Image (cartoon, rainbow, N blue to C red):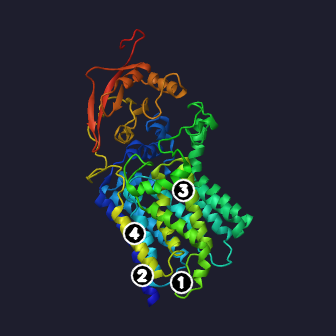
Amino acid sequence: MEDLNRSWGEILWLCFCVAAPGGYAIYAGQDANWDQRNYHIYTVYSWLTGRGTVDLAAAQIQTWLNPAPHLIQYLLIRNAPPVVAGALMGALAGLNGVLLWTLIRKVQNRAGGWTTRALASLVVLMGLTGSLFLSFVGTSFAEYICSLPILAGLISLIGHRGDEQVSNRAFLVSGLCLGAASGLKLTNLVYGLGMSATLLTLWPFLRFRLGALLSFAAGAGVGFAAFGGYWAIKLWLAFGNPVFPFFNSIFRSALYPPENFTDARFLPASLPTAMISYPVAWFLGVHPTSELPFREPRFAFAAALLLLAICAMPRRPSLASKSGVEAPLTTPRDFWLIALFFLFSYAIWLKQFGIQRYALPLELLTGVIALVSLERLLPTARRRVLALGFLVAFAVVWTRPPDWQRVPYDRDWFGIVGVDMSSRPTLYLLMSWRPTAYAITAFRPDDSFVRLGGNMPLEPDTAMGRLALDRIGAHRGPIRTLAMEPLEDAERDRLGRFGMSLTPGSCKEFRSRMDVFQTCAAQAISSRGSPQ
């Protein structure tokens, strides 16, 4: 009976992990983040409707990102009432709590007793109240989906006791999961590389078999191919670059300059300094890794406790012999596997991106790091519960999530009204960096869209610019601009370089729940510089 009650207790807790984020999504409001309006919705819509050959760069440089990780959110947004879609996306994010519970209970070897379950519950609570996690709940961001296979990849390699060898299957599953996360979104290569570095570092000490490491590598390749291979092949056949337009200095697609597009806004000047100072900065509310302010104490807690635990390890054997000292439930192998995976991934993330959004798996693991460190610092489970409980309570109160933008729920997610459906098939020229691509879903299927401005602005003397010129020249119906405000001088000049000018008095407006759009008729400029 006690075992049955324990099982029901765990089931209720896991249901809470899913239900609580769903409820928070309703409380926080409907997601209206910039990336959703720019590419989260449009890329899936384009993929499902075959608009890839109709439009050109409609969602800026993000047009060609793999749409698969946003598919579930797209279907919910397009087909469910907004509040239901938000709640279900929140519940989906809550699955991370289920995996955190699975991870920590496996670390604990599913030991009984109220203290072990209390510690596992506190670890989950710390993960599900993190600043990034809360900001993602109920949104269209892919990070909380990609974190699921990342956590699963770690789970498959831990919980092995004594001299028990980790099976090749466990390495294969880990590789599959981390490869799948990387295939869904290339930025998750951080965690695949982090685990690879961890396994290579531990190989001489834990005597992993070569076959096990090869199984991990094979699984990673299969996982990446299964979730990213289709899109990579599609881009390769269309552009000669499987990650177009990124890394084009390597693949040399003719439609993009031979350069590697990088977002260097958040890269640290010094990696060692950043690794030490950033957790303190985040604790204080300084945000060198994000365009939006936030306050996050978890990394500072995890870093301090991990450092203390490593320094205390030489004294641990003598302490363990004293009466009243309870041995850690976490084996040394699991401790180093989790700690090194966290540290390597953290360093690679900072070196390659430094963008806070991509650090969600690390934030989720801060509670795990805190617990396995406290096991080596405090002599009894009761003291560990008190210490971790204090840290979790402080973190919940101190945390301030970034605001990606939310609006109240209504009857329609976007509420786009006033789009002109009366004219013939129209070519729309998107002129600015503002996120307008989501509105394309409200236009007629035979309208087409070409973006001349944005974060990859086109010029007539470039390969993609010439393709845009061909689209403009071949179109036989109306041509209009599409923006969120009157065109600036630079945008009018760019329009002129493509042989077009605005028709006076032709501008119209339409609206969504988030934005006001302006569309103006455009006409060809004659060789003498006046409209034809």
Residue holding disc 2: 8
Task: Kindly indicate whether the residue at mark 2 contacts the one at mark 3 (C-beta within 8 angstroms).
Answer: no
Q: Is 56 or 150 nearer to us in this picture?
A: 150
Q: Residue at left 70%, top 65%?
A: 203
Using the image, determine if residue 323 lies above or below residue 302. Answer: below
Instruction: Give the mark toward the camera: 2 or 1.
Output: 1
Q: Amino acid at mark 4?
A: Val
Element class at badge 3: helix
Q: Residues within 10 Å of mark 4 (few under 14, many from 20)?
A: many
Marks 3/2: CA–CA distance: 36 Å
Quarter the N terminus occupies: bottom left
Element class at badge 1: loop
Count numbered badges in the picture. 4
User: Could you say which quadrant of the image residue 432 lies in?
Assistant: top left
Q: Residue furthest bottom?
A: 1
Along the polypeptide, which appears first: circle 2 or circle 4? 2
Using the image, determine if residue 395 lies above or below residue 293. Answer: below
Along the polypeptide, which appears first: circle 3 or circle 4? 3
| Residue 176 point in image, percent of width and height | 60, 60
Residue holding disc 4: 392
Q: Residue at left 60%, top 33%?
A: 253
